[in-house]
Amino acid sequence: MRELIKAADGGQISLDWFDHDDSPSHPDSASRPTVILLPGLTGTSQESYILHMVQQSRDLGYRCVVFNNRGVSGETLLTPRTYCAANTEDLETVMDHIQQNNRAAPLMAAGVSMGGMMLGVVLFSAGWDVFECTASLERPLDRFLFNSYLTSCLQASVDRHRPVLEKCYDIDHVMKAKTIREFDERFTSVMFGYPTNDDYYHDASPVHRLKSVQVPMLCLNAADDVFSPSHAIPVEAAKQNPNVALLITCHGGHIGFLEGLWPRQNTYMDRVFKQFAKAVIEEGTLLADLS
């Protein structure tokens, strides 16, 4: 079910709800555990990795709600504002809305890639240091395979909303960007008022916030993820915070984590999500005591 809610600036945010009215373990809708899912950079509720987590949540009897970043899931952009990895105002609006309407329901969040960089009790394939992430994606092969494609996806979203955005930004200049860094220099950092793109990238890097995490948080990364290079994964910083568990696999790529010779259906990421979601919601007190 699609729900549109108003933002403080007059814009709208789309939420996609996957309820579970026939849940045998949580038949009462008012107290049914709710999982908020945050997709990646250009992702929506229809990404396969999101739908997998929806199914895992359903197996546990929980409801899910997917927070779609502004302008990416078909809704009209009402104001000249989209989203970035460092700004959580829309997410805070969504969290308040969900909590006010589900006061008796346990709540947790899971983020994938950029979604994990913004918030989450469980994070998958998060880019910890945006400077290192963009540098990795600018290597010749990775630029060809990933960077150019993602840049074109970002530009396509901007171009779809050109009538409202061109009032404030030089969209023709944005459309000439060849990399994510150039896109952010010309559009994202400008939109959110950063003096320079470096200021934005520093703000967007969750490595700087790891020490302030005060609830149990599980982070899954793969050592061969070009979006989040292994040398930039904050192993030592994670060791200093008892609330943070950092799980690094040798392989898995970016939001991959396939298993077996002939991978089918569930992935390692799916299994980790399901187990941790159940632990947080059903054994949250015991989990907190471990930290």
Image (cartoon, rainbow, N blue to C red):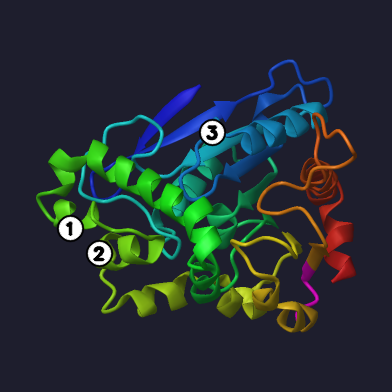
Q: Secondary structure at mark 3?
A: loop
Q: Secondary structure at mark 2?
A: helix
Give the Cα distance between marks 3 and 1: 30 Å
Looking at this view, name the residue that lies furthest to the top: 22
Give the Cα distance between marks 1 and 2: 7 Å
The reply to whether residue 104 is in sight is no
* Category of crowding for the residue at label 2, using alpha-carbon neighbours closer than 10 angstroms: few (below 14), some (14–19), many (at least 20): many
Quarter of the image containing the C terminus? bottom right
Query: Depth check: 40 or 215 in front?
Result: 40
The reply to whether residue 291 is in sight is yes
Q: Which residues are magenta?
A: 241-245
Vertical relation: 245 (above or below) 161: below
Horizontally, residue 26 falls left or right of residue 72, namely right
Upstream in sequence: badge 3 or badge 1 = 3
Closer mark to the observer between disc 1 and disc 2: 1
Q: Position of residue 81 (x, y in %)?
A: 26, 51
- Which amino acid, mark 1? His
* Category of crowding for the residue at label 3, using alpha-carbon neighbours closer than 10 angstroms: few (below 14), some (14–19), many (at least 20): many
Residue that label 2 marks: 186
Residue that label 1 marks: 173
Q: Position of residue 287 (x, y in %)?
A: 86, 60
- Which amino acid, mark 3? Ser
Which quadrant would residue 26 be assigned to in this image?
top right
Residue that label 3 marks: 45
* Category of crowding for the residue at label 1, using alpha-carbon neighbours closer than 10 angstroms: few (below 14), some (14–19), many (at least 20): few
Q: Secondary structure at mark 1?
A: helix
Asked if the residue at tag 2 contacts the one at tag 1, i.e. Cβ–Cβ closer than 8 Å, the answer is: yes
- Give the main secondary structure of the magenta stretch: loop
Upstream in sequence: badge 3 or badge 2 = 3
Q: Residue at x 48, y 50 (%)?
A: 41
Horizontally, residue 224 falls left or right of residue 194, namely right
